[in-house]
Amino acid sequence: MPAATKRRGFTLIELMIVVVLVGIMTAMIIPEMKGTFEDALLRSTARKLVNILNLAYSQAVTVSQPHRVRLDRKSGHYVMERTAREGEGDGGFVPVRNVIGSEGELDTRISIDIRNPDEDQAPATDPDSSSAPREDAQKPARSDFISFNPDGTADDKEIILRDREGFRLALRINPTTARVRIIEAPRE
C-alpha cells in the first residue's frame, strides 16, 4: 500500500460543523424574512390604495363628475363610483364598470381605518399614540367613502394601514390638491 492515500469524503465532524453553521444562519435570517414579508404586504396594500385614489381623482377631473372610492373595511373590497345619471340607480352613486382597476380586493391581513384628520384621536405620527383606532367588535361592518370633485379637490381624510406586527402606514389625502402622501407611522 502506498504511504500517501487520497481522501475521498468528509468526516462526520466536518459535516456536523456545516449543519450547525447552516442552522445558525437560518435562525438569524428567518425572522428578518418574516418582517420583510409583512412590510412588503403593508406597502403593497398602500400602493394599491394610492392607485385607486389617484384613478378616482383622475376620472373626476377628466369627466367633470364627482367620483368616490367606497372601501369596505371588513372585507377589503374597494370600488370606484360616479354620480348616477337621471334614471340610473337610486340617484346616488353607481360603480364605474368601464375603467380597468376601478374595483378590487385588499389583503385582509392588513387592518384599515379611515378617519378625518381633525378627529380627537392622536395623529398617525404621534409617538405617544397607544394604538390605532380599531373596528369595535360590536359595530356592524361599515363602508367608508373618499370623494373626489371635478375641480380637483377631495375629502380631507387619512387612511391608517396596520399589519399584524403593529407596523403602520398613513395615507393622507390633501383636500386642496387631492394628492395622496404615504407617511410611515410609529410601530404600535
Image (spheres, rainbow, N blue to C red):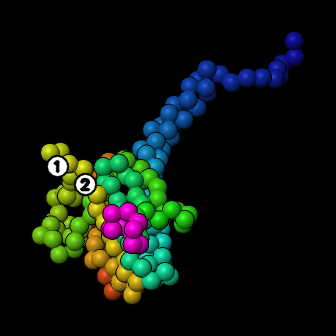
Q: Is residue 87 found inside the magenta-colored segment of the image?
A: yes
Say if 109 sits above or below 60 in the image. Answer: above
Q: Is residue 73 found inside the magenta-colored segment of the image?
A: no
Residue 101 image position (x, y, % from top left) = 52, 62
Q: Quadrant of residue 52?
A: bottom left
How would you classify the magenta stretch by its main secondary structure? loop
Left or right: 175 in relation to 21: left
Quarter holding the C terminus is: bottom left
Q: Quadrant of residue 94?
A: bottom left
Quarter holding the N terminus is: top right
Compute the Cα span from label 1 to label 2: 8 Å
For disc 1, the marked residue is: 139
* Numbered disc 1: secondary structure: loop
- Label 1 environment density (alpha carbons within 10 Å; few <14, some 14–19, many ≥20): few
Stretch of the chain drawn in magenta: 84-93
For disc 2, the marked residue is: 142
Say if 27 sits above or below 114 in the image. Answer: above
